[in-house]
Amino acid sequence: MANDALALAGIDAFYGDSHVLHGVSFVLGAARLLGLLGRNGAGKTTCMNVTMGMLRPRRGTVTLFGQAIAGRAPEDIAMSGIALVPQGRRIFRSLTVRENLLVAARQPQANGAHAPWTFDTVYATFPRLKERQNQVAGYLSGGEQQMLAIGRALMANPRVLLMDEPSEGLAPQIVAEVMATIRRLKEQGLSIILVEQNAKLVFDIADDIVILNSGRVAVAGTTDALRRGGVDLHQHLGIY
Ligand SMILES: Nc1ncnc2c1ncn2[C@@H]1O[C@H](COP(=O)(O)OP(=O)(O)OP(=O)(O)O)[C@@H](O)[C@H]1O
Ligand SMILES: [Mg+2]
């Protein structure tokens, strides 16, 4: 559909002989926020790896704004307007904050939704990064490293942002800050997938929710519909 930012359709993915994703399909609408939930090992990060071209699916398609991208090289996929904030942040610890941002900088596509992200706009969003711009990133706190990982992804001026468990290991107050930032990014027109284990965070912020269970889509729908329908989180996530 023209209004789809990103669509995975019928994805089967393997690590060696291990069959991890089984016919996974879901759609991220343009300027929407999709929460991708699932317990440890459900296949959330694998969906990110497939989308970013780091793991080639054995079957299925990935479509970014109507363009098929599955099977392309990761650099090509990144160039086509999608960026990942990886699980565990993966910042360059021996580079400074500024250098981390610089290596990711990329000119926006003409049809980008937001005014281009630059050092100035990233620093305005995360003032603490500005204060620490000449510090080596390995010495930042966990929350600051997460902000840097998000800022780095934004420097690529993506149209679709994938965030893999950005709240992991952070204190509640920092998590609230990160969530407020994600909400603002959505309001600015970015299409976002938020991978989470914390169902409450996702129900608070997402327009749409997909729950993976053992590499299969177990539940999918709008947040409102799932709230009304009373989805059984205990069954699918093993919590609550
Ligand atoms: N590089 C790899 N090689 C082999 N198996 C892997 C690899 N990465 C993940 N797996 C396996 O694939 C399955 C899905 O893993 P994945 O990392 O996608 O889960 P996840 O939902 O992101 O979990 P978590 O919430 O713990 O990050 C798991 O069974 C995992 O052990
Ligand atoms: Mg993961």
Image (cartoon, rainbow, N blue to C red):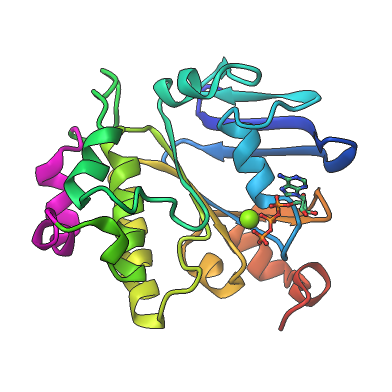
- Quarter holding the N terminus is top right
Q: Residue at x 54, y 65 (%)?
A: 202
Foreground residue among 166 and 219: 166
Tell me: 142 left or right of 50. left
Q: Residue at x 63, y 49 (%)?
A: 45
Quarter-of-image position of residue 31: top left
Q: Position of residue 232 (x, y in %)?
A: 78, 73
Quarter-of-image position of residue 234: bottom right
Boundaries of the magenta span = 116-134
Q: Position of residue 51 (x, y in %)?
A: 60, 33
Report if residue 96 lies within the magenta region.
Answer: no
Q: Residue at x 67, y 69 (%)?
A: 228
Report if residue 125 lies within the magenta region.
Answer: yes
Q: Residue at x 30, y 71 (%)?
A: 141
Tell me: 125 left or right of 61. left
Foreground residue among 6 and 118: 118
Quarter-of-image position of residue 16: top right
Q: Is 172 drawn above or below residue 24 in the view shown?
A: below
Q: Position of residue 195 (x, y in %)?
A: 56, 55
Q: Position of residue 197 (x, y in %)?
A: 62, 67
Q: Residue most toward the front? A: 94
Residue 32 seen in the current view: no
Tell me: 89 left or right of 114. right
Q: Main secondary structure of the magenta part?
A: helix
Q: Is 17 drawn above or below residue 200 in the view shown?
A: above
Residue 238 seen in the current view: yes
